[in-house]
Amino acid sequence: MGMTLAEAILSRKAGRPVKPGEIVLVDLDFMMGQDGTSPLAIKVFREMGGTKVFDPSKIALVIDHSSPSPNHGVSQLHDMMRKFARETGVILYDIGEGVCHQLLPERGHVVPGDVVIGADSHTCTYGALGAFATGVGSTDLAAAMISGKTWFRVPETIKITLNGNLPKGVFAKDIFLEIARLLTADGATYKALEYHGNTISQLSMDARFTIANMAIEVGAKVGLFVPDEISIEYARKHSSRNFEPVFPEKDAVYENEIEVKVDSLGPRVAAPHTVDNVKPIEELEGVPVQQAFIGTCTNGRLEDLEIAARILSGKKVHPDTRLIVAPASKMVLKEAIKRGIVETLLDAGAVFVTPGCGACVGTHNGVPADGENVISTANRNFKGRMGNPNAFIYLASPATVAASAIEGRITDPRKYL
Amino acid sequence: MELKGKAHKLGDDINTDYIISGRYKFKTLDMDELATHIFEDLDPEFYSRLNPGDFIVAGKNFGCGSSREQAPLAIKHAKVAAVIAKSFARIFFRNAVNVGLMLIQADTDSIDNGDELAVYPEKGIIKNLSKNLEIPFTPLPEFMLEILKDGGLVEHFKKHGGYRIQKGR
């Protein structure tokens, strides 16, 4: 009986074969906290008697959720993180560097086969590189900063096969929204997702990060892509670390298998207030939108800004709509400037904010008004998510968001491609 | 271990924002203060009806949403003995064990609001005293029960100097 990718990675770490349902204690390759969770982790670290961290080069604190600080309370918490970083030597990514889940792969902290935790629910993003990466709370992070370890229940795996060519106007986001519709918001709770199929070789790393990022939206622990030329090349380019990728075995046993026929998909939109409330765009076309948002750990990468610029080139954002863009990192922003993407978007009427999470998590940088509809490239549309429980959030691909910004209502991007 | 108290019933997909609204959770790290606001958006009187040792009983996917620990901490500080649900979102599950909040995964359909329950976490039995029914459940792994008995991961680390789990188990 062969091993799935999740089982193979955890077995290598544990130094023995592991089976779903077992509890394993494993050494971690990297760990991360952001400004919403690190302050509590630092507090707990001290309560546990922590004085120094196990290895400062394997820990990053990222100031991205409220960046730069919108108020005094947050400033004090940021100050606490900066002081902790100075004191312990851990890596600090301060304001404007970018969203944690873009920074960790981009700066080479994660490579295939790694086991990584982050005190942020979207840590599963690095599954795109074939790393077992998952979100935890502040206490788990504190314990890991002291011990270098954490425990996992070895998850069962759901195999998801993506087959067919991507049709015009259909992107990674649409693929995942279809998966969310099929599995529902808790359909993969505690499980690993493992992606296979002939569509994958057509998916860039940016596209794979989008799909891996949203694993938590169906309750999953990780969303894993099997390492291939594309992901290994990415890791080699971004990281100086040596690594040995891990692969699933041919006779691996999956708890469940689903197939998505990518070539028959059209653009998808998740309507308020749950991520699995997914509809074909035809059912929602014409819904007015007062705000459009392109950014986040899901869809704020170069490829996302590029497709938005292609659609908005020579066009104008509708006068009744605001278009807010938050590049996923400073490096993404610089590259977007170099390629003329930023100029195209600015000319179309977009507003740029500091690379970070603000608008998506409702801390600042784009809180909608009562009764407003927002179309966003983010991963969650819960009531109140963007800072106002009386607003309505629709989730879609950057192409759909860009097309909707032009018309001021939810719009099929295919007519602009 | 025997836990006895009254059931306070909630539905499916109770997310971390319903447990403790963002209006409060960003403002303070005082968990006793946060505890007085639990489930306020669902039912403003919820906290006032709660007695120490009572149970929160829910449907599937309890605790979905963000990774913030304020959610299980606020429930614990409201002196809830355990949350009993059909299933839990995984980060909430970890966080609850780490902060020392007992979780029981069981079929909750036969439990109604106000039922008196006796729960035996190690034996895997819920006795519904009001209905004279027994509900079996799979107890948490020993490793997690140990962290819970220590009062959470902070106390567990203080006591053992690290994780007490054996590598080859």
Image (spheres, coloured by chain):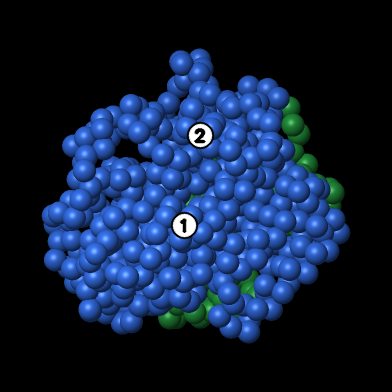
Chain colours: A blue, B green
> Label 1 near label 2: C-beta < 8 Å?
no
Say whether residue A308 is visible: yes
In x, y percent, where is residue A393? 31, 67
Q: Give neighbour class at mark 1: few <14, some 14-19, many 20+ (Cα, 10 Å).
A: few
Residue A231: image tag: 2
- Is residue A93 shown above or below A192? below
Residue B64: image tag: none
**Where is residue B4, by image quadrant?**
bottom right
Residue at mark 1: A338
Which numbered mark, 2 or 1, is in the foreground of this view?
1
Say whether residue A297 is visible: no
Q: Give neighbour class at mark 2: few <14, some 14-19, many 20+ (Cα, 10 Å).
A: many
Extreme residue in the bottom direction: A72
Left or right for A340, reference A34:
left
Q: Are marks 2 and 1 on the same chain?
A: yes
Left or right for A81, reference A372:
right
Q: Amino acid at mark 1?
A: Lys
**At 51% from the left edge and 23% from the top edge, which residue is drawn?**
A248
Nearer the observer, A390 or B154: A390
Chain holding disc 2: A
**At 33% from the left edge and 82% from the top edge, which residue is drawn?**
A369
Q: Amino acid at mark 2?
A: Ser
Chain holding disc 1: A
In x, y percent, where is residue B143? 69, 41
Nearer the observer, B72 or B119: B72
**At 68% from the left edge and 31% from the top edge, which residue is drawn?**
A242
Q: Secondary structure at mark 2?
A: helix
